[in-house]
Image (cartoon, rainbow, N blue to C red):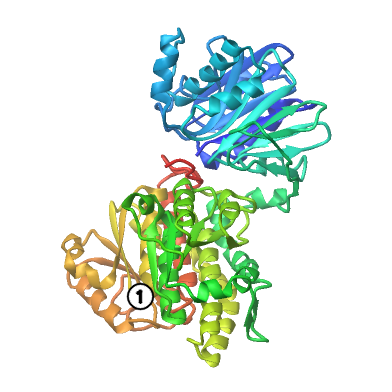
């Protein structure tokens, strides 16, 4: 949930850390802080607010010098967002400094024990408890910092990615992770630490991703040492070459990352099926499917676990898998999955979906499924992420970096991967005819062009947004494959504009929600030609008769819904199976424009963070 940056080397640390925090601000932006060490002089600055507020404070109050430092941008879990609760935190002696992403679940009992030993606390955070626990172990047993961190973490219950240093040791940083991501960039006699690789892309392409329950001791002029937290045994670190480039994480002329990412969807969808779909030969080839084809075909059922937008992608997949591949599917909130004692067997396949690959609830669901013998398949965007490593196999979406907190291209690329999976399994099972299979391959190959066409409605959608920006409630309705799209559209509006919105199956409207409809209630209806069209038209007539305001997403050339709706947004025609890849685009744009017109921060909506690494 929080962003961590650190530097140790011969450069000035401040510009590297402050720029890195700006790139990680999507992970949390309640408060920010930085600690710089210049020899023995420690300068700590921290403040409630965004990284820009921290930058102003540093430039006005201190001389930001030092070749070692750590920085933090926070999404609050323990303690309200304020200056005192901001990271970094210092130990009681003032010698040890820490930044932390995660939650220490047993911090209260640890705090009581430390108070009994004379320690005092100024913040409400679990992190201040952790740094004093490390100091207590270090002083009591006269240990080096690395060993003290290792022993202290064995007393901790929870999740963490931490970076710690001792002001009396200006050439060493100790880092560790459990459940929260942490990467180390390796340069020429310099090291970079970050929650993901974006803060150090222009300096090095060589990186180590710590695994769960690993720590590293980073010293200047020495090789990095990676150890197991549990038993202190040495680990041979794997250095990987990063493929991401700096331009991928810049706005590229767009006003917001979210708008850029909406417009990147044609390319992202194509990149996701590139090399996997061959329409000329009528083939889908994914090594993760081919290598485990029998396991997947012989599954009694597929269980999809995910959260938020990824859960909505899973609902779309449920329709596709059951309709085309004739495989029974259950879609579960990962956050509830392990708490209801689910029935899982060796004959089940669990598909875990996560943009970041670090979602704590989804990771917990994966571990439960594996403990029961299920085969676990991961779908995520971030190479080397925890879910990519924890699952038996899986597929990357190739969406590219998604910086906007509200997911857009993650949703469409997840659906693309899941569609490829369903089609390949359907072909292997013989549950789809050759002609239908080839037709869908051809149509899928055309989806990027159709999304491009849907994006051309941007100016028209902005005009509609201006009409409804002051609404306080909104309903989204869809049927069949487009019911999950209605849910996703409502979520987008809630996330970035703070307007209350709900998605429903269109037929469910008359079972309760219709009571809400009056002349002030905008209702967004997905009413494309393919799939339950006449039934949706009937639902629109029900809304119209109660004076509701209708915004309809329709197939190009539609006349019937046009006559009923207050506003229409046209999209290119497609098969019902693939329609969610297109119909979701105007709903993303509608939410975006409403939020911008209301003056909201669309890339960093309040109370949210991009990667939810705590439960």
Is residue 543 toward the left or the right of residue 554 in the image?
left
* Residue 145 makes an appearance in the image: yes
Rendering coords of residue 312 (x, y %): 41, 62
Residue sitting at x 54%, y 14%: 136
Rendering coords of residue 226 (x, y %): 70, 35
- Residue sitting nearer the eye, 387 or 406: 387
The residue at which mark 1 appears reads as: 480
- Residue sitting nearer the eye, 177 or 94: 177
Quadrant hosting residue 453: bottom right
How many neighbours does mark 1 have within 10 angstroms: few (below 14), some (14-19), or many (20 or more)? some
- Residue sitting nearer the eye, 333 or 521: 333
- Residue sitting nearer the eye, 582 or 134: 134
Measured along the vertical axis of the image, is residue 257 above or below residue 411?
above
Measured along the vertical axis of the image, is residue 154 above or below residue 120?
below
Measured along the vertical axis of the image, is residue 221 above or below residue 113?
below
Quadrant hosting residue 546: bottom left
Residue sitting at x 36%, y 51%: 494
Is residue 423 toward the left or the right of residue 507 in the image?
right
Is residue 174 toward the left or the right of residue 342 in the image?
right
Question: In the rendered view of the protein, which quadrant contains the C terminus?
Answer: top left
Rendering coords of residue 287 (x, y %): 65, 70
Rendering coords of residue 114 (x, y %): 45, 14
Measured along the vertical axis of the image, is residue 580 above or below residue 75?
below
Is residue 461 toward the left or the right of residue 536 in the image?
right
Residue sitting at x 31%, y 56%: 501
* Residue 587 makes an appearance in the image: no
Mark 1 element type: helix
Q: How many marks?
A: 1
């Amino acid at each position: 949930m929080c962003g961590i940056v650190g530097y140790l080397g011969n450069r000035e640390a401040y510009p590297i850390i402050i720029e890195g925090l700006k790139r990680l601000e999507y992970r949390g932006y309640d408060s920010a802080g930085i600690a710089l060490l210049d020899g023995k002089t420690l300068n700590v600055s921290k403040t409630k607010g965004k990284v820009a507020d921290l930058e102003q404070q540093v430039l006005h109050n201190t001389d930001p010098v030092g070749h070692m430092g750590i920085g933090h941008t926070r999404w609050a879990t323990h303690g309200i967002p304020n200056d005192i609760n901001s990271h970094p935190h210092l130990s009681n002696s003032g010698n040890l400094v820490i930044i932390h992403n995660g939650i220490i679940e047993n911090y209260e009992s640890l705090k009581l024990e430390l108070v009994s030993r004379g320690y005092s606390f100024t913040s409400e955070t679990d992190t201040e408890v952790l740094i004093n626990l490390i100091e207590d172990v270090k002083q009591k047993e006269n240990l080096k910092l690395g060993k003290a961190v290792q022993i202290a973490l064995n007393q901790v219950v929870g999740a963490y990615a931490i970076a710690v240093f001792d002001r009396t040791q200006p050439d060493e940083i100790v880092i560790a992770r459990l459940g929260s991501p942490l990467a180390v960039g390796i340069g020429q006699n310099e090291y970079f630490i970050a929650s993901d690789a974006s803060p150090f892309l222009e300096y090095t392409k060589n990186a180590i991703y710590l695994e769960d329950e690993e720590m590293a001791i980073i010293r200047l002029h020495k090789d990095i040492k990676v150890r197991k937290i549990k038993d202190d045994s040495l680990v041979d670190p794997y250095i990987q070459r990063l493929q991401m480039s700096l331009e991928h994480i810049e706005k590229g002329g767009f006003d917001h990352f979210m708008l850029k990412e909406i417009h990147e969807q044609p390319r992202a969808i194509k990149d996701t099926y590139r090399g996997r779909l061959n329409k000329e030969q009528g083939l889908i080839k994914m090594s993760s499917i081919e290598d485990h084809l029998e396991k997947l075909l012989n599954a009694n059922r597929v269980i999809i676990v995910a959260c938020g937008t990824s859960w909505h992608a899973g609902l779309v997949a449920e329709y596709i898998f059951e309709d085309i591949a004739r495989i029974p599917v259950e879609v579960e909130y990962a956050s509830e999955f392990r708490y209801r004692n689910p029935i899982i067997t060796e004959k089940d396949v669990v598909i875990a979906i996560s943009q970041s690959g670090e979602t704590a609830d989804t990771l917990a669901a994966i571990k439960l499924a594996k403990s029961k013998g299920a085969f676990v398949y991961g779908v995520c965007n971030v190479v080397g992420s925890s879910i990519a490593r924890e699952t038996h196999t899986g597929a990357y979406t190739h969406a590219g970096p998604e910086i906007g907190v509200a997911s857009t291209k993650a949703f469409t690329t997840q659906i693309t991967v899941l569609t490829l999976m369903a089609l390949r399994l359907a072909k292997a099972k013989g549950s789809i005819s050759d002609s239908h299979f080839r037709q869908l391959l051809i149509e899928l190959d055309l989806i990027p062009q159709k999304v491009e066409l849907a994006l051309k409605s941007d100016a028209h959608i902005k005009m509609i947004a201006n009409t409804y920006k002051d609404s306080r409630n909104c309903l989204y309705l869809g049927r069949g494959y487009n019911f999950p799209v209605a849910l996703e559209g409502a979520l987008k509006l809630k996330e970035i504009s703070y307007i209350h919105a709900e998605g429903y199956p269109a037929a469910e409207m008359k079972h309760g929600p219709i009571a809400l409809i009056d002349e002030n209630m905008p209702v967004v209806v997905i009413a494309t030609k393919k799939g339950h069209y006449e039934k949706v038209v009937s639902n629109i007539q029900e809304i119209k008769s109660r004076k509701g305001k209708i915004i309809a997403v329709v197939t190009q050339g539609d006349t019937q819904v046009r006559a009923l709706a207050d506003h229409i947004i046209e999209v290119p025609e497609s098969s019902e199976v693939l329609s969610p890849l297109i119909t979701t685009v105007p709903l993303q744009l509608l939410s975006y424009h409403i939020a911008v017109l209301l003056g909201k921060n669309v890339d960093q909506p309040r109370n949210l963070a991009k990667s939810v690494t705590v439960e």
